[in-house]
Image: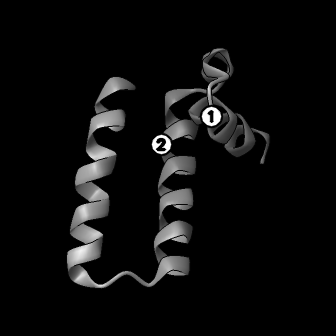
Amino acid sequence: MLEMEGLIRAALGEVDLMDTVSPDIALSAQIFIFGILLQDDRLAEAELESFIKEAEGPAVEFM
């Protein structure tokens, strides 16, 4: 749970918190968070494609 909090806080600007999260845990937590966000929003197909395109830019920065 603390890892997910760290990832969210890192996304909001506290990037030093990413240093304490292993890549395996980070990936699992990101997939979980992403699934919850998509489930809650119930996006139409066009909205989902737009969301994914918008998320690709920041995701590339962390890879």
Q: Tell me what residue is drawn at x 29 percent, y 71 percent.
A: 48
3D distance between C-alphas at marks 1 and 2? 17 Å
Quadrant for the C terminus in the image? top left
Q: Tell me what residue is drawn at x 65 percent, y 14 percent.
A: 16
Tell me, what colour scheme is on the image? one colour
Q: Which is nearer the N-term, disc 1 or disc 2?
A: 1
Residue 58, given in percent of the width and then of the height, sits at 36, 34
**In this picture, is 12 found above or below 56?**
above
Check disc 1 and report its element: helix, strand or loop: loop
Circle 2 crowding by C-alpha within 10 Å: few under 14, some 14–19, many from 20: few
Q: Tell me what residue is drawn at x 27 percent, y 36 percent.
A: 57
Circle 1 crowding by C-alpha within 10 Å: few under 14, some 14–19, many from 20: few
Q: Which residue is mark 1?
A: 12
**In this picture, is 46 found above or below 1?**
below
- Amino acid carrying label 1: it is Leu
Residue 21, given in percent of the width and then of the height, sits at 63, 27
Q: Which residue is mark 2?
A: 27
**In this picture, is 51 found above or below 19?**
below
Q: Which of the 4 quarters of the picture holds residue 51?
A: bottom left
